[in-house]
Image (cartoon, rainbow, N blue to C red):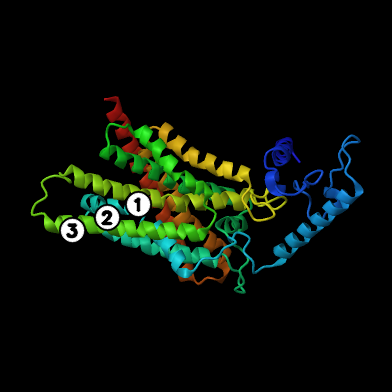
Amino acid sequence: MNPVNKKLQNLTDWSNKHIFTSSLDYWNQDAPAAPPSYQMQPAGADPASYLDYGTSDDQMSGDANNSRLETIQEDTALTTVRGNDKDSDPHAGGEPISALQAAWNVTNAIQGMFIVGLPIAVKVGGWYSILAMIAVAYICYWTGVLLIECLYDNKGEKVRYSYREVAEFYRPGFGKWVLAAQLTELLSTCIIYVVLAADLMQGCFPSIDKAAWMMLVSAVLMPCAFLDSLILVSQLSFANAISHLIVNAIMLIYCLSQQEISNSLPNQGFKTLVNLVLVTKALLSYPLPFYAAVQLFKDNLFRGAPVTPFTGCYSPDGSLREWALLLRIILLLFTLFIALSVPYLIEVMGMVGNITGTMLSFIWPALFHLKIKGDKMVDRDRKFDQFIIGLGCAICICGVYFSFLELLRAMNSADQ
């Protein structure tokens, strides 16, 4: 082990011992003399070697050692059984949802706050923008199909369970880049929702500045740190869909009942009503990407050693450990910090999104599919994958170029 990896391993072990501890797992019962030490033990190691017998001043009794050894053996056996079960998804949540609930989550992801900006996009881009959106939706559908095919081997058995596992099979170590892109995309979405909600609230009540509104919005979103059920997230997604229908109904009734629109929502009371509904929509859109980001962190860092570097987030009784809740709150506050501190945030997010979005939705699925399934593909499918990769690269380059020009324009406008 090189010095850098050794230092990282020492840091991980120290964190598991002093920070990510079992904590309140034994709230109403006697705690063991010392917590079990699972820090990155080699596969197949004797569970008895996990025991830390301490010093002569702090010795555990023989009964405590035996009891602890039995517990470790049970946990080890359970981990082995789960690891050998190819049909079990290690990333799946403990509470399944129905197809309808999943549909609400997909609807939330597709028609987030940004869908209300489609009219101005069509106004600026014309018919070409409509054709482009249809084409992008169609290609994203097929790249999703390609990514799903990468989860299965040539016999039709599911052997990979996540985007990162597909990337790791493509090239060991590449999964970290995919994970980083996923987290960047999800957290950027959360940040944008905070900014949009604050902008809308400032439009309603201009006496309070935008930074203060961001803090108030984040305070309202704080319960998202307690979300631990995908069913509840799907219910919030359903409420988000209803709020979008309300926005459409309000705008449709207004447009049909007014003879002429000489100004953009000239009535201040009506403008406030529309903005408040849009704020509600932004707040209801936030939980889904935040929950997805939390699950990515949990699946890749906090499932317990030696599967992941750090201790699991959940107690033996299934409850969320308080340090894990603290980390969720810190993650939520991180989105607030970025929203407050990064200058030209919208332009920067647009440039970053052009990179992560095209990579996750266009380039990587086709690239992974070409590598994993290439030997079984016909020439037409192989050329289709290559076309998507080339198209994704072109979109990424053009998007970054124009986003950079927009960033320069915003900086020049601020200087003037």
Total marks placed: 3
Residue 256 horizontal/vertical position (percent): 14, 59
Residue located 46% across and 48% down the image: 185
For label 1, the crowd category at 10 Å Cα-Cα, with few meaning under 14, some 14 to 19 and many 20 or more, is many
The numbered mark, 3 or 2, whose residue comes first in the sequence reads: 2
Residue type, numbered disc 2: Val
Let me know if residue 80 appears in the view: yes
The numbered mark, 3 or 1, whose residue comes first in the sequence reads: 3
Q: CB of mark 3 within 8 Å of CB of mark 2?
A: no
Which corner quadrant holds the N terminus?
top right
Q: CA distance from mark 3 to mark 1?
A: 19 Å
* Foreground of the two, 124 or 53: 53
- What label does residue 215 carry, if any? none
Residue 92 horizontal/vertical position (percent): 59, 61
The numbered mark, 1 or 2, whose residue comes first in the sequence reads: 2
Which corner quadrant holds the C terminus?
top left
Q: In this figure, which residue is indicated by the disc labeled 1?
A: 281
Q: In this figure, which residue is indicated by the disc labeled 3?
A: 253
* Foreground of the two, 196 or 2: 196
Q: In this figure, which residue is indicated by the disc labeled 2?
A: 247
